[in-house]
Amino acid sequence: MSETSKLENDNKISVGKETEGGITSSYAVDDGVELKVPYSFFGSIYDENEEKAVLEAMHKDSLTMGPKVQQFQSMFKEKLGVKHALAVSNCTTGLHVIAQAIGLRPGDEVITTPNTFVATSLAIVKEGATPVYADIDPKTFNIDPNSIEKLVTNRTKAIFVVHYGGQVCDMDPIMDIANRYHLIVVEDCAHAPGATYKGRQAGSIGDFGSFSFHSLKNITTLGEGGMVTCNNDRWAEAIDKLRCMGNYDWESQTDYWIPSHFDNRLTGGKWANNYRMNECQGAVGVEQMKKLEMLNEIRIKNGRYITEGIQGIKGITPVYEDPNCRHIYHLYTVCVEEAELGASRDDFLRVLYREEGVQGILHYQPTYDFTSFRQYKAVSNCPNADAFFYKRELNTPHHPRLTKDDLDNIIAGIRNAAEKVRK
Ligand SMILES: Cc1ncc(COP(=O)(O)O)c(C=O)c1O
């Protein structure tokens, strides 16, 4: 990276309040706290390659769904070893077209995790289906396969899993349940491009994967973007139509304008959308794919450095790496064990933030606790997910531009905060 680009990247750490979209575009808080390590909203590294790619793409005739988007799709497909990769406007719209393609409708149930961004469940309820929440594993924070099977009913149509923080779920038992009950498995891979499970890429194990290239993610296509992956030709064709207007050729087209340029039809009974990706995003996606391994390796190295640095602090649990997985550290999630620490997670987080200058963030409030989803809470029994969000977890800043000083400040901050709050 050139010195100028590095400076520009460093500058991106200081996110201002001049953003819209609330928590989807900034965690900056205007409370006078001097931060040593703020929580950055930019999860990648850009340099002159992305800049050049954008400039070239913006001067072409076709500004959307053109050759750059196609190249990005091809690279993605190859990386995952899947038959189809279809670019979309973001992971939420990716999940939505998947929900449409598999024909979710009122009366259907989908077993999913409450420990995720609200997008995962939005895709389910948008098609009128009911999310049914399974509890999470207290070590990986992923959906616990043991809590899935007892929730299967004759209305269950699919399982939507999320590879929390960049570590793939325990997919073998999940696929086994899905096979036995004929359920479709959707992998929400927003955190997991390049993560693996028993050598298999996230997004290539279930029936579908949906990836995010939002600003925070391991690779980003100018702040927004997504990719759907699958191996089934029929479903890929449905996704292709549903992401882009539902336009079809007329059966009896004579000249290209007769009877008109295109017909419009429902796809599997569903109305289509405009969920396209533009060429500048596609061009940046191509450059980001070239960096994916490098970016993931930096995250892994930094994650392990923090783990080593905070090992052995009573009441503090570092990230657990499942030996079956390549964890790509989208998040670095620290758990506070309140009884052992002798203080609450919130007291710890307060000291870490106010006195140590390290901004910790919580992901994710169990989805069934949001006002719009409370109707699905009654049947939910997820004590691990509740304890995780309300008592245990916090995420320290984790992106590939962290310096050694940043990492040492995070480690020292966690050590000092633990000692300060211990009673
Ligand atoms: C687990 C998970 N799923 C889905 C999404 C939605 O991604 P997007 O912002 O690309 O729609 C996110 C984004 O933060 C996420 O973390």
Image (cartoon, rainbow, N blue to C red):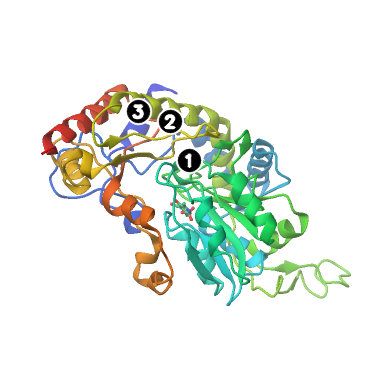
The residue positioned 24% from the left and 29% from the top of the image is: 313
Residue that mark 2 sits on:
299
The residue positioned 76% from the left and 68% from the top of the image is: 248
Image quarter in which the C terminus is found: top left
Residue type marked 3: Thr
Measured along the vertical axis of the image, is residue 204 above or below residue 365?
above
Residue type marked 2: Arg
Residue that mark 1 sits on:
166
What percent of the width, then of the height, locates residue 373? Answer: 40, 70
What percent of the width, then of the height, locates residue 35? Answer: 19, 37
- Locate residue 414: give its quadrant: top left
Distance from label 2 to label 1 (Cα)?
A: 10 Å
Distance from label 3 to label 2 (Cα)?
A: 12 Å
Residue that mark 3 sits on:
307
- Of the numbered discs 3 and 2, the one sitting upstream in the chain is 2
Instruction: Using residue 157 as the reference point, say whether residue 138 is left or right of it.
Output: left
Which residue is at the front of the view, 256 or 210? 210
Q: Are marks 3 and 2 in contact (CB under 8 Å)?
A: no
Which residue is at the front of the view, 98 or 177? 177
